[in-house]
Image (cartoon, helix red, strand yellow):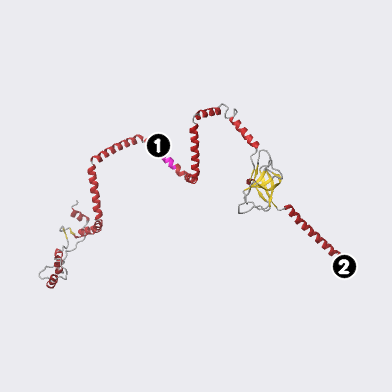
Amino acid sequence: MMSQQAMSQRFTGLTKLLAGLVAVLLVGSILLALSQRDGKKYLTADFAQANSLYKGSAVKVLGVPVGRVESLEPQGDVVRVKLSYKGDLKLPDDVKAVVVSPAIVGDRFVQLAPAYSGGATLKDDARLPLDRTRVPVELDTIYQSLDDLSNALGPNGANKNGALSSLVDDTAKQLKGQGAQLNQTIRDFGKLSTTLSNNSDDLFGSLTEVNDFVSLLKKNDATVRSFNASTAQLSTVLDGERDDLSKALKQLSLALVDVNALVKDNRGELRQNVQNLRELSQVLANHRDGLDEISVAAPTALVNVATAYNPSSGSLDTRAALLEAITGGAKDPATLLCNLAERDEDDPLCKMLQDNLKLPIPGLPRPAAASTVYEAPSQGDLHDLMGVR
């Protein structure tokens, strides 16, 4: 029984010891991680090359040191550079890394640009690919380019037969004594550049419209080609008819001369004719309503005439009613007399006429009844009536 208690106590003590060791290791790991970070942020950038860039080289923002190069490691076609910078420094999410050479000979540094001015920030341990880094042109590359240029322009190149020397001599002869004019040309070109710069929006707007026009032509290439072919055929036809066309134009020129002479000789008559036409047009315009009424009533009147024509007797079967027209229809002779006398109905004379002239008037003949209505004449009878054979 005592042995079990002793074993239990020993096991409990061992458990406590292990728990203490784990806690110590955990705290140590945390402290180690914090000591390694040291309040810094890290950035990895891929460069095409890293000449004169070493571990410990400066990392700057706007020329101010903010960190250092931690390591450089070749990775295939690029050099992967690990950079550290201050932990409280913010960098924009689209930041770029540029290797800057302050002198021809000497160490270089890494410039981070642009500086942070707001917006999203770059995360810690971010990586910049090759398209977001830049390196300077090496001096050896510049020397090699100059050497290639001198060889291309030298006796083994463009000046093999003295062409370049001739060009320089001829240019010197052409510009001899033209210094003032050349100076003015350069000044004018500078003014032109300034004008184009001030009107860049309009210029680029015109270029955009030209681009749209070219795109439209491209989309309608078949139509444009067909139009060009038709124009070419028209040109061929006109070329074949050149003599006839020349004669026609010559005759037209002579006709225009005759017309000019005719107009000049008859200027007064033409002016009078134009004036008469204007007056006639004005008369027609003034009686437009009457002409409209005639155009509507004339067909009906002609139909009535054709209907009233009697081919057997060669007369019009119609009821003239002249007596009614004279006496006002023999319905109210007192009113007719008052109207002829221009008297009102309240006038004593009109009242007397109304009292003495009572219908019907004795001895006044009655109007005759209308004649028998015949059928509408045929087309041939109407032609006979109008005298058309």
Tell me how far mark 1 sits from mark 2, CA to CA. Answer: 125 Å
Quadrant of residue 22 within the rendered picture = bottom right
Q: Amino acid at mark 2?
A: Gln
| Residue visible at 83% across and 61% down in the picture | 17
Rendered view: 163 above or below 100: above
Location of mark 1 (residue): 236
What residue span does the magenta drawing correspond to? 226-237
Q: Is residue 219 visible?
A: no
Looking at the image, residue 166 sits to the left or right of residue 302; the answer is right
Q: Which mark is residue 5?
A: 2
Does the segment drawn in magenta span residue 348?
no
* Mark earlier in primary sequence (1, 2): 2
Quadrant of residue 16 within the rendered picture = bottom right
Looking at the image, residue 127 sits to the left or right of residue 257; the answer is right
Q: Amino acid at mark 1?
A: Thr
Does the segment drawn in magenta span residue 231?
yes
Q: Nearer the viewer, residue 382 or 368?
A: 368
